[in-house]
Image (cartoon, grey):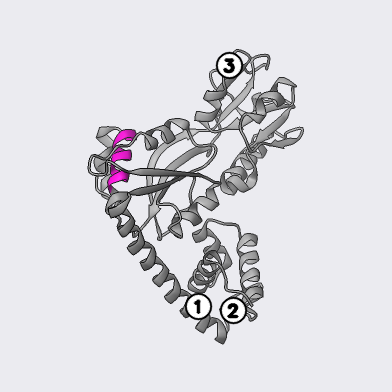
Amino acid sequence: MSLPEVRLQIAAVTLAEELSFTRAAERLNITQPGLSKQIAELESRIGFAVFVRDQKRVELTEAGHVFVRGCKDALALLEKAVRTGRATQEEIQPLVTIGHSPYVDPVLVSALLGVHLPLYANLRLRVESMFAQDLVHSVLSAEVDMAIIEEPADSPLLTLVPLVTEPLYVLLSTDHSAAHLASVSFEDFGKVGWMMFPKRANPTLYEKVMEAGKRAGAVPVEVHHYVTPHEVIQLISENFGVAIMFKGIAQQLERNDLVARPLTAAGLQVNIRLVLRADQSSRLVNEFGRAFLKRVIPQGQQAEISGQLLLKL
């Protein structure tokens, strides 16, 4: 038997509260198979069943009731320890940890890195790049203080601050028949391959893209997945197809032989959010969040957003 990781304890507590893999997976912003795998791993590590489950219901075992109560107590103590330690650290050497996906608009990352707080002259920033689901877990477990995430799932444990809503973009060769258009649709792609961010990077958005393509009757010859956006440059130049990307990255990759065009398709607007724990109480983190939002949100919209937050603008 080995002690389960915090992420597994959080999975057990969430499933115990929801008694539904569907609802628990949505709260955790992971897939149902992913949650099932975590619960199986947890039970394997601790050596007993926490849940009894079949196709219709999920219930806690007697041992599971005791275990989940212990997890809640342990997570509360861990959270208190993190807060106390962070408060002490802020007094000695202030640090804010920021997360973002590899595909987020570089302009937003630059705005974060450009924040200066007069009261924290020695402020240090640590930046972590992860996929969307990992970022959500890192915020929940206090591994990062805040993160910029595309299409995060709603959760009562999180504060989601709207930053920008924008279309996905398509990067294509200037030789492509749609290169002259101001915007492109799936029908404009033709019979070519699609280059996509990997599904694990953002499962929700990935499925939206594929479903929108099906509705439009567009079927890729094949799908290529890129991890680093720059990988698509050679693939496009060698006629492997078109790349579906986030706006900021696509525009950054434009050059003489490549153009970036917005993708017009119903339901494919990307909502980018600043994500914090709902109970975030660090004065430093709140000050930093306020300063960042003032840099990226137009003055007239700041009053609308301030009512949602612990960090008042």
Q: Residue 302, can we see it?
A: yes
In this picture, is 305 found above or below 240? below
- The residue to which callout 3 is attached is 255
- The residue to which callout 2 is attached is 50
Dots 2 and 3: beta carbons under 8 Å? no
Dots 1 and 3: beta carbons under 8 Å? no
Check disc 1 and give the amino acid type. Answer: Val
In this picture, is 297 found above or below 123? above
Looking at the picture, how far across and down is residue 16, in whole percent?
51, 74
Tally the marks: 3
Residue at 55% across / 69% down in the picture? 20
Which portion, as a residue range, is magenta?
287-297
Mark 1 vs mark 3, CA separation in Å? 55 Å
Looking at the picture, how far across and down is residue 268, in whole percent?
53, 37
At mark 2, the secondary structure is: loop
Check disc 3 and give the amino acid type. Answer: Arg
Dots 2 and 1: beta carbons under 8 Å? yes
Residue 294 shown in magenta:
yes
